[in-house]
Amino acid sequence: MNRKSLLPLLFGLFIILTSCSKYQKLLKSTDNEQKYEMAFAYFEDKDYYRAIQLFDQLQAFYRGTDKAERIAFYYAYAHYEQRDYILASYYFKQFARSYPNSKNAEESAYMSAYCNYLDSPPSSLDQTVTLDAIKDLQLFINQYPKSERVVKANGLIDELRMKLETKAYDIALLYFKMNDYKATILNFQNLIKDFPDTKYRESAMYHIAKAYYSYAEKSIDSKKAERYQHTYDAIDNFASYFPESGNIKELRAIQKNAQKQLSNLSALQ
């Protein structure tokens, strides 16, 4: 590397080191007014890491003053901008509780729930955060029913409920693949109960019927009649909802076999 190309690199390094040195002096300084000004300057420059460090120091010093509210609000947003949604949600919620009369209280209540929405994992993972997000969004809607954010909040709830719906469906289907027919039936029935408008209704009802038939076949003699009858009824129920389904032919064949088994069992009594 020649000297001409090295000079810009050295100059840039010098600027970085000088900036770091000034920032370290600022952190150690007792001039809280300067820290206050610089914290917001760093925030505006999108240097959220440095802003957070200064806000950390300033919160205790300005507690109980007019400046404390502004610091707390920007402190929450600094974590949000760093995509630390867990802490951001916590600090937004804390702000809304500490300053219920603030002009930023509504926004903070919404942002606390929105951060949980952003932190909600894929449906294949634990959905505790998803449930928290739904709860917080609904609390926001209840608290601010006339807010312009209500429409957005309802949309987010719908998205999160779809994730829970998919989670429930995947669990039920897994039980079916594991040949645990009792758990299959229970979980698919709960899916339909919890999500009446589910897009998985046809598949759920199809697997319930098939699970009942397999459950009946593997049952002890004293339980067979009851479970073959459940099979027969589940298929009739499926047909009433989905008469044009591509699965009707298969299920009617199963129903015919179930009816035959019921007749045989009845003849033995």
Image (cartoon, rainbow, N blue to C red):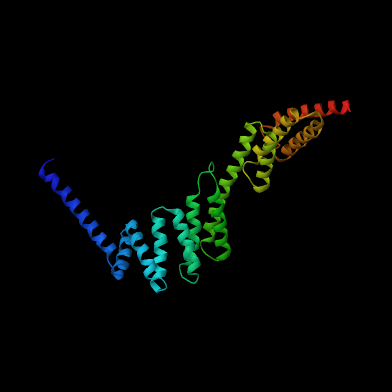
Judge from the rendering whether residue 182 lies leftward or rightward of residue 35; answer left or right.
right
Residue 136, given in percent of the width and then of the height, sits at: 55, 58
Q: Is residue 268 above or below residue 106?
A: above
Judge from the rendering whether residue 262 lies leftward or rightward of residue 218; answer left or right.
right
- Could you tell me which quadrant the N terminus lies in? top left
Residue in view at x 37 percent, y 62 percent = 56
Q: Is residue 203 above or below residue 23?
A: above
Q: Is residue 50 above or below residue 65?
A: above
Q: Residue furthest left?
A: 3
Q: Name the image quarter holding residue 268.
A: top right
Judge from the rendering whether residue 68 lies leftward or rightward of residue 23; answer left or right.
right
Task: Tell me if I can see residue 145 in this picture.
Answer: no
Task: Tell me if I can see residue 216 in this picture.
Answer: yes
Q: Tally the numbered discs.
A: 0
Q: Nearer the viewer, residue 175 or 53?
A: 53
Residue in view at x 31 percent, y 69 percent = 32
Q: Residue furthest bottom?
A: 65
Residue in view at x 22 percent, y 58 percent = 21
Q: Name the image quarter holding residue 245.
A: top right
Residue 244, given in percent of the width and then of the height, sits at: 68, 35
- Could you tell me which quadrant the C terminus lies in? top right
Q: Nearer the viewer, residue 170 or 64?
A: 64
Q: Name the image quarter holding residue 23.
A: bottom left
Residue in view at x 67 percent, y 33 percent = 180
Residue 57, given in percent of the width and then of the height, sits at: 35, 64
Residue 150, given in percent of the width and then of the height, sits at: 54, 61
